[in-house]
Image (spheres, rainbow, N blue to C red):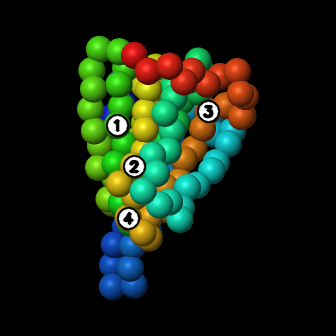
Amino acid sequence: MAHIIDLKTFTDIRGNLTVIEKVIPFDIKRVFYIYGVDDSKRGGHRHCKTIQAAICIKGSCTIYNNNGATEEEFELNQPDKCLIIEPDDWHTMYNFSKDAILMVFASEYFDANDYIYEPY
């Protein structure tokens, strides 16, 4: 099931520095980011094998997850919070703030055959 991990952040008078090192539970093969979203929902799928790590580095959004046994919503609104999305998590992303930037790391390269669009 999807879960939040805290990213190490160093804060001083100069600002914040968040580090992503040795906390993502997979080797990163792909990075993408979503921004400029209107009222649309994004996602609407799960994967055969891809694991993802989602960070809303600016603004906020909501991610709904359903692994077939548990449904849960995650509000991503801090750049030091990372949502790990397992392959069996059917997910949608919505409620994007106007300034939202959602960055996602993926364990696999894009493969159209890895996507399962049917919800549980």
Which of discs 3 and 1 lies nearer the camera? The answer is 1
Between 25 and 62, which is closer to the camera in this rendering?
62
Instruction: Return the residue found at the far front.
Output: 39
> Where does label 2 land, which residue?
94
How far separated are the C-alphas under marks 3 and 4?
A: 27 Å
The residue type indicated by label 4 comes to Ser
Q: Earlier in the sequence, mark 3 or mark 1?
A: 1
How far separated are the C-alphas under marks 2 and 3?
A: 22 Å
> Where does label 3 land, which residue?
107
Which of discs 2 and 3 lies nearer the camera? The answer is 2
How far separated are the C-alphas under marks 2 and 4?
A: 9 Å
Q: Position of residue 1 (x, y in %)?
A: 35, 24
Q: Earlier in the sequence, mark 1 or mark 4?
A: 1
The image quadrant where one finds the C terminus is top left
Q: What residue sits 34% from the left and 72% below the top?
A: 11
The residue type indicated by label 2 comes to Tyr
The residue type indicated by label 1 comes to Tyr
**Vertical arrangement, residue 119 with respect to residue 106, above or below:** above
The label on residue 97 is 4
Q: Secondary structure beneath disc 2?
A: strand
How far separated are the C-alphas under marks 1 and 2?
A: 8 Å
The residue type indicated by label 3 comes to Ser
How far separated are the C-alphas under marks 1 and 4?
A: 16 Å
> Where does label 1 land, which residue?
64
Label 2 crowd bin: few (<14), some (14–19), many (20+), radius 10 Å: some
